[in-house]
Image (cartoon, helix red, strand yellow):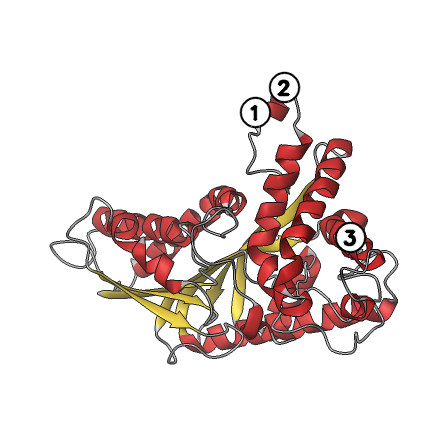
Amino acid sequence: MVMKNVGHMNAGDDETSYANNSALQKGVILKALPILDDTLRDMFAAAAESCFPKIWKMVDLGCSSGPNSLFVISHILDTVEQLCSKNNFIGSDNSPEFEVFLNDLPDNDFNNLFKLISGQVIGKNKKRRCFLYGSPGSFYGRLFPSNTLHFVYSSYSLHWLSQIPKGLDRSNKENIYMARTSPREVFEAYAKQHQTNFSTFLSLRGEEMIAGGRMVLTFVCRSVEDPSCKHYSAHYTLLSQTLLDMVAEGLVKMDDLYSFNVSIYMPCEEEVKTVIQIEGSFNLDKLHVFPVRWDAQDNIANYENDLVFDKHRSGKLVVNCVRAFMEPMLAAHFGSSIVDELFGRYAEKMGEHLSQEKYSSYYTIVISLSRKSK
């Protein structure tokens, strides 16, 4: 399965849309802001020795269709304008013109995204000279001319692979992702696909960015080297179990389950460092790994204050978040008729899981890179 055909979030703004189920991603963006801000300040410190561009070009890769992309773009532009003013760049008005590109796969709901633009990106600064463009296409291919981008941003997109790893066929059987029962070749195939994709991504961005350009990337990772650790595949294991239950009831074909695998890879810190070093286009300036609670979009205060835990509410909230990014590929593979039943059952299993592992978390990595001299 090639991801450009089905690798998009749920469109629109209804109950199961990405736009209404991306609070978790918003929380990750907020946690990563300190590194983003430091990177912009470092860029200006370097620019003080030369000339800051009058037209500043950036892209959000994997922008999706909700408000999160516009929130972070607005934050970036506000920060750049403040730094320009503080350092007396760009002449009397101290503000560059901005070219901002919003990138995602062609089936992304760009219409919903552009409906939100004016209020969020322009904000209170009515004089901001900002030009926004949709840029559909895979970021595992070339998107922009050489030496044109000053800044690249991406949040929660790079753990997606360009395709299902080759060679899996039916070897993963009842699993839809890497699991403790998966054979070694499954882990090797996923790792190889990630290495290929991430190296390609860095090489292409290296061509598109100016020397000294900066890039901030945030994506899901592992905190340990062992990819079979159950904590990193638990929600996919629960989804596999839900599908197996439906196979047993004749609602899903076993052959369909055997041929389905998720095109996501969560690398460990060392894997990320190794690919960056071997590819060679960028300096790794900053790296930070932090935990994220599965139910981060729920009322976190309930846990911190030991109030009553509602497994049904939490199960539904987490599964709605998963559904927002998994439904298109599940519907394409198994058929749209099973989707509501599948996610209803999945929510029940998720609620039970969360009630037993109250502080279940996964990990996120944020890295800041600078383009080496060409």
Q: Is residue 193 above or below residue 82?
A: below
Would residue 218 be visible to someone looking at this image?
A: yes
Q: Which residue is mark 2?
A: 307
Question: Can you give x and y, in whole percent of width and height, for residue 263 in the image?
Answer: 66, 66
Residue nearest the viewer, comparing 286 with 166: 166
Residue at the (42%, 67%) spot, across then down: 103
In the picture as drawn, the residue positioned furthest to the left comes out as: 92
Instruction: Give the alpha-carbon distance from disc 3 to disc 2, as whole Å.
Output: 29 Å
Question: Which amino acid, by three-letter code, is at mark 1?
Answer: Ala
**Cβ–Cβ under 8 Å for marks 1 and 2:** yes
Q: Earlier in the sequence, mark 1 or mark 2?
A: 1
Tell me: residue 306, above or below residue 137. above
Most foreground residue, 332 or 76: 332
Question: Is label 1 or label 2 in front?
Answer: 2
Badge 3 is on which residue? 237
Q: Residue at x 61, y 58 (%)?
A: 326
Cα separation, mark 1 vs mark 2, equals 8 Å
Q: Earlier in the sequence, mark 3 or mark 2?
A: 3
User: Which residue bears the numbered disc 1?
Assistant: 301
- Which class describes the residues within 10 Å of circle 3: few (<14), some (14-19), or many (20+)? many
Residue 348: image x %, image y %?
72, 40
Mark 3 or 1: the one toward you: 3
Secondary structure beneath disc 2?
loop
- Depth check: 50 or 163 in front? 163
Q: Amino acid at mark 3?
A: Thr
Q: Is residue 27 left or right of residue 307?
A: left
- As drawn, the label of residue 337 is none
